[in-house]
Image (cartoon, rainbow, N blue to C red):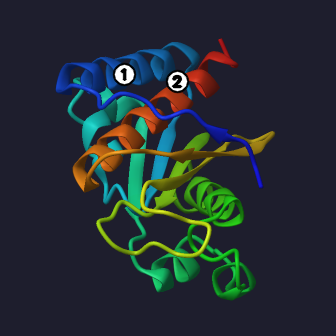
Amino acid sequence: MREVHPDIDNPSDNELIRAAESVVSMGSAVSLTIGTAESCTGGMVCATLTEVPGASSVVRGGIVSYAIDVKRDVLGVSREILDAPGIGAVSSECASAMSRGARRALGCDLAVAITGIAGPSGEEPGKPVGTVWFGISSPSTTNTLLFRFSGDRKAVRRKANLVALQLLHRELTRFA
C-alpha cells in the first residue's frame, strides 16, 4: 500500500480561486499548458481554473471521465487495470493512466487526474469513502498520490479540487 497523505481542511472558495490563480500565473510564466482528467470531481478542477482571467493561455481543457468506458475509450486506461480485482478505477494505476491519457488527448504539457470515492456510498474493500488517487503527468514523469479525505461528498470533492490545483502548481514550479 502506498503512503496515505494526511487529510486537509475543507477549502474556502477564496482558497480554491487563489490556488487556481497561482496555477494560471505559473503556467504563463513557464509557458506550459495544462489539462485535467476528472472522475469524482466531475470537472470541478477545470471549472475552477477557467474562472481565472487569462486561463485560456494555459488551460487546454478537461475530460470528465466519470464512466468506466470513458476512462478506457477516451483516456486509454487498460481493461487490465479497470477489471483487475484490488486495482480498478480507484487506484494508483488508473490515476497514472488517466493523467497520461489526458496529456495525450488534450495535447498539453502537464495533466492532473483525480479518481476516487466521494460518497456517500461506493465503498470497496480497502477503499473507504474519501479514498482519492491523484496522478500528475509531465513529459518526463508520472507520479501518483493517495489521500483519504474526511467529510461528506461535497467536502471530499472540494478537498480533491484543492489538492489537484496544488499538484499542478508544484509540478509547474519544477520548470521555473
Quarter of image, res 136: top right
Left/right placement of residue 117 relative to residue 83 reads left
* Residue 147 placement: quadrant: top right
Residue 43 pos. (x, y %)? 31, 54
The vertical placement of 64 against 165, above or below, is below
> Where, by quadrant of the figure, is residue 138 drawn?
top right
Three-letter amino acid code at the position of disc 1: Ala
Please report the residue visible at 32 percent of the width from the left and 49 percent of the height from the top: 157
Q: What whole-number distance in Å separates the C-alpha atoms at marks 2 and 1?
A: 8 Å
Tell me the quadrant of the picture where the C terminus can be found: top right
Q: Which mark is residue 169?
A: 2
Judge the density around disc 2: few (<14), some (14-19), many (≥20) Cα neighbours within 10 Å. Answer: many
Q: Amino acid at mark 2?
A: His
- Tag 2 and tag 1, C-beta contact below 8 Å: yes
Residue 31 lies, in percent from the top left, at: 55, 22
Please say whether residue 46 is visible from this viewpoint: no
Q: The N terminus lies in which quarter of the figure?
A: bottom right
Residue 65 percent across, percent down from the top left: 42, 69
Where is mark 1, residue-wise? 19
Q: Nearer the viewer, residue 77 or 84?
A: 84
Residue at left 36%, top 60%?
A: 118
Specify which label sits upstream in the sequence, 2 or 1: 1
Residues 170 and 85: in front is: 85
Give the camera-side residue of 171 and 89. Answer: 89
Q: Pick the residue in front: 99 or 31.
A: 99
* Horizontal arrangement in the rendering, residue 158 relative to residue 103 (left or right): left
Q: Report helix, strand or loop for mark 2.
A: helix
What residue lies at 39% left-to-right and 50% top-to-bottom? 61
